[in-house]
Image: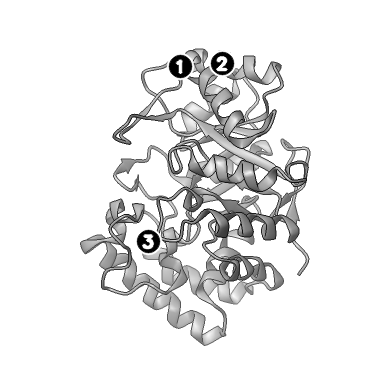
Amino acid sequence: MAMIYKKVDKIKEEISAIGIGCWNFGGDWDSSEETNSIKIIHAAVDAGINLFDVAPVYGFGVSERVLGKALKEGKREKVLIASKCGLLWNEKHETRNNLTKKSILKEIDQSLKRLQTDYIDIYQLHWPDPNTSIEETVSALEEIKKAGKIRYIGLSNFCKDDIEKFMSMIEINTLQALYNMLERNTDSYHEIPLNYKTEEEILPLAKKNGQMFLPYSPLFQGLLTGKFTKGKNFSEKDIRNANPKLNGDKFNTYYEGVLQLSKFANEIGRPLNEIALNWLRQNDAVTSIIGGASSLAQLEKNIHSTTWDLTQDELAQIELIIKPFEFL
């Protein structure tokens, strides 16, 4: 299967339409296991995937270490590593936002060490920090970019106004936001409020400015595989237990949408997970889908989605199903 690549003005390289999200390599998900994770990373690179999205907080350093170990043997130059900064944690694994210059200068060196690399291709601010001025954060980014520690700069989970403020001070190459068929303009992620509307605000902004757009949680943390039931879907250790949309009354609402989408998938003879990925890929504002893979089989399914397209009629049928979720 030949990988599909996309190109945007703000990034020199062509980027694989399917990327790899590395959160589940860090031990926070039921599927986490280092040997398995490394096999998945190697297979992804061999299949032509060249974007790997990670963050220090994923597994509290573990995901970066696993990715660095996997890429060390001759694969680093074949890929773009997109890591992040600004979300710190304590010994109890309680997180806090910090985009001060002092913190960023410390974080970049820690990430480089864990990733076993001299540079990070795309360095993204993970979440806004209302207690730090944009000017101070920009100063840190300018310094580490000048030092050759980062190549491109990205913003994740920022509102339109703040993105434009950053853009007035420094080049912003990539934008990342929560986006999938059932979370198009949603106002929360887990328990965290989102001060942006992805489809209404962020997608048009990225397209207008030639920026790479990276949708995270493309399968709604597994819900859009169609394999969840109304019973318990995770072990006690799985981080997805903290997502209220995957538990209780909110889950029931989204589950009804999944049932309708699953029925549609059966009618056209395609797997729901591939439909969800193609719905994103066929949007020309979307550059690379940050998809997780817990097994080689799942990786192959993600890649297989690039071998076929949804028709315009099928996209219209999907829109009828997901329209009620447009602002949920």
Pair 3/2: label in front: 2
Regarding residue 220, the answer to whether it shows in the image is: yes
Q: Which residue is mark 3?
A: 325
CA–CA distance between discs 1 and 3? 37 Å
- Work out whether residue 65 or residue 290 is closer to the camera in this orientation and state it: 65
Query: Which amino acid is tagged 2?
Result: Ala
Q: Where does residue 256 sit, x and y in percent of width and height?
A: 32, 73
* Of the image marks 2 and 1, the number of the one nearer the N terminus: 1
Q: Where does residue 326 sit, x and y in percent of width and height?
A: 40, 58
- Work out whether residue 60 or residue 162 is closer to the camera in this orientation and state it: 60
- Work out whether residue 68 or residue 290 is closer to the camera in this orientation and state it: 68
Q: Name, please, the residue furthest toward the front.
A: 35
Residue 140 is marked as 2
Q: Secondary structure at mark 1?
A: loop
Say whether marks 2 and 1 touch (CB < 8 Å).
yes
Regarding residue 4, the answer to whether it shows in the image is: no
Question: Residue 77 appears in which quarter of the rendering?
Answer: top right
Question: Residue 184 appears in which quarter of the rendering?
Answer: bottom left
Q: Quadrant of the N terminus?
A: bottom right
Residue 71 is marked as none
Query: Where is 102 relative to 304, above or below?
Result: above
* Of the image marks 3 and 2, the number of the one nearer the N terminus: 2
Query: Which amino acid is tagged 1?
Result: Thr
Pair 1/3: label in front: 1
Question: Neighbour class for label 1 at 10 Å: few (<14), some, many (≥20)?
Answer: many
Q: Which residue is mark 1?
A: 100
Q: Secondary structure at mark 3?
A: helix
